[in-house]
Amino acid sequence: MDFWGFGESGKKRDSYAVQDFVSLVDQFMDRLGIVSAPLVGHSMGGTVSLSVAIQYPQRIQKVVVVGSPIVGSSLAWPLMMAGYRPVAVVLFNFMWAFRLAMRIASPFICRDPRFSDMMDRDLSRTTVESFLLSIASLRRTDLRPMLSQIRVPTMGMFGDTDNIVNPRQWQPMQAGIADTRIERFATAGHFIMLDEPVTFMLKLKDFLDQETVEG
């Protein structure tokens, strides 16, 4: 599922806030007849997944977040700056330079040699409005006061060398959610599934395969 404004989803909206994406997950599940399911989200997708568990608890069996900001201020400062309109407009007006900069920075973000092409493809499918408004909304997000409302098993997966989201964002998860499991990856960054694919999949499968104890 692509969020509005990203990938294959529609890009003609006035709002691309985190709350819009939370509603989108509920609508998506409703349209497909999915009563409840585990959610796995990377980065902002994990923030949205936790928010769905808070607002639509009947929908969620488990939640896995991967390198996700619990507090928006944990975003790297260049990304937070992109949530300001003047900066976002400059980036998108000089998209060729932005893409070139991302290609140069790619080895410092992810070890997978395919990453630069993947990121370039994603950027080509994103509009300035969706990029600007979603980052601005994420920057203002703070889930800490609501985490205690989450009653389903959760797992936080964080790379210790993450330079996109502060890698210590596992701490508010552990402090705020009663049933949570933390998996840290010493040599992985923001894209754990690409940096450590085998270990990532084994830990994810192990968590999803565990039976949930009722009551």
Image (tube, rainbow, N blue to C red):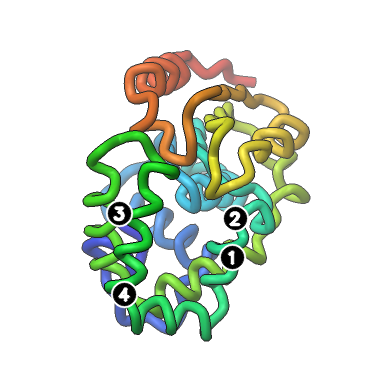
Q: Nearer the viewer, residue 7 or 112?
A: 112
CB atoms of marks 3 and 1 within 8 Å: no
Q: How many marks?
A: 4
Residue 119 picture location, percent across and down: 30, 54
Residue under circle 4? Answer: 95
Disc 4 from disc 2: Cα separation: 20 Å
Q: Which mark is residue 76?
A: 2
CB atoms of marks 2 and 1 within 8 Å: yes
Residue under circle 3? Answer: 119
The single residue placed furthest to the front in the displayed view is 104
Residue under circle 1? Answer: 80
* Crowd class of label 1 (few under 14; some 14 to 19; many from 20; radius 10 Å): many
Mark closer to the observer (4, 1): 4
Image quadrant where one finds the C terminus: top right
* Crowd class of label 4 (few under 14; some 14 to 19; many from 20; radius 10 Å): some
Residue 23 picture location, percent across and down: 46, 62
The amino acid type, in three-letter code, at marker 2 is Ala
Q: Is residue 69 visible to the viewer in this orientation of the structure?
A: yes
